[in-house]
Amino acid sequence: MQFGHLGIALAIASIDPRPETFAVVTAAQFLPNADSLLIRAGWARPEFHGTWSHSLPFCAAVGALAAGVFGPWLGVLALGSIVLHVVADLPTDTGIPLLLPFSERRFSLDLWRNTGYWGHSMYAGYYRQPWAWILEGAVFAVVVWRYAELLA
């Protein structure tokens, strides 16, 4: 997912619509892709994207850290947000190493091709695939539904 990650963060933030909730769940939602910044800076190889930062132990560590810093409720929401980021990336054909460092096995639903981790070609390639529109459309339908309820 590309823009769908923002949709997931918005949907989770609607559970507790406060600015701090939005900030924490959005940060947790986008944290797994921060590895692409390391690659762009030349500090990591392109193969580094989608490894450690997309594992369940990393998700647990982020949730625990968020709970320690922001309290248990926001820690739970941060954990849910980062786990849903990883789940949203499962459809890619490259797979996600969910159990790293315990196992290097990659899990995948193989619904779409990986189109990279940065730039125009990533977005252009991703949004040419039907499943991208279907799944992200579903995410944003939930967002519209949740916020329509909140604003009613």
Image (cartoon, grey):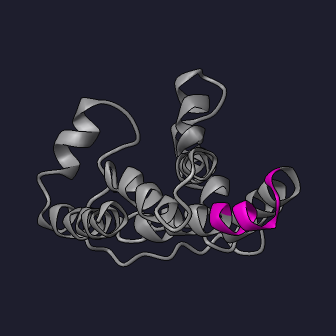
Q: Is residue 90 left or right of residue 4?
A: right
Q: Residue at x 36, y 56 (%)?
A: 7
Which quadrant is the C terminus positioned in? bottom left
Q: Residue furthest front?
A: 152
Q: Is residue 75 on the magenta stretch? A: yes
Residue situated in front as seen by the camera: 136 or 128: 136
| Above or below, comparing residue 54 to residue 149 in the picture | above
Residue 111 location (% of width, % of height): 26, 73
Residue 105 location (% of width, % of height): 60, 75
Residue 33 location (% of width, % of height): 53, 45
Residue span colored magenta: 70-78
| Above or below, comparing residue 57 to residue 46 in the picture | below
Quarter-wise, where is residue 108 in the image?
Answer: bottom left
Q: Is residue 79 on the magenta stretch? A: no
Q: Is residue 79 left or right of residue 26?
A: right
Name the main secondary structure of what is drawn in magenta. Answer: helix
Which quadrant is the N terminus positioned in? bottom left
| Above or below, comparing residue 116 to residue 28 in the picture | above
Q: Residue furthest top?
A: 41
Q: Is residue 17 left or right of residue 132?
A: right
Q: Residue at x 31, y 63 (%)?
A: 143
Q: Residue at x 53, y 48 (%)?
A: 26
Q: Is residue 135 left or right of residue 128?
A: right
Quarter-wise, where is residue 146 in the image?
Answer: bottom left
Q: Residue furthest right?
A: 68
Residue 22 location (% of width, % of height): 54, 49
Residue situated in front as seen by the camera: 143 or 107: 143
Q: Residue at x 64, y 65 (%)?
A: 77
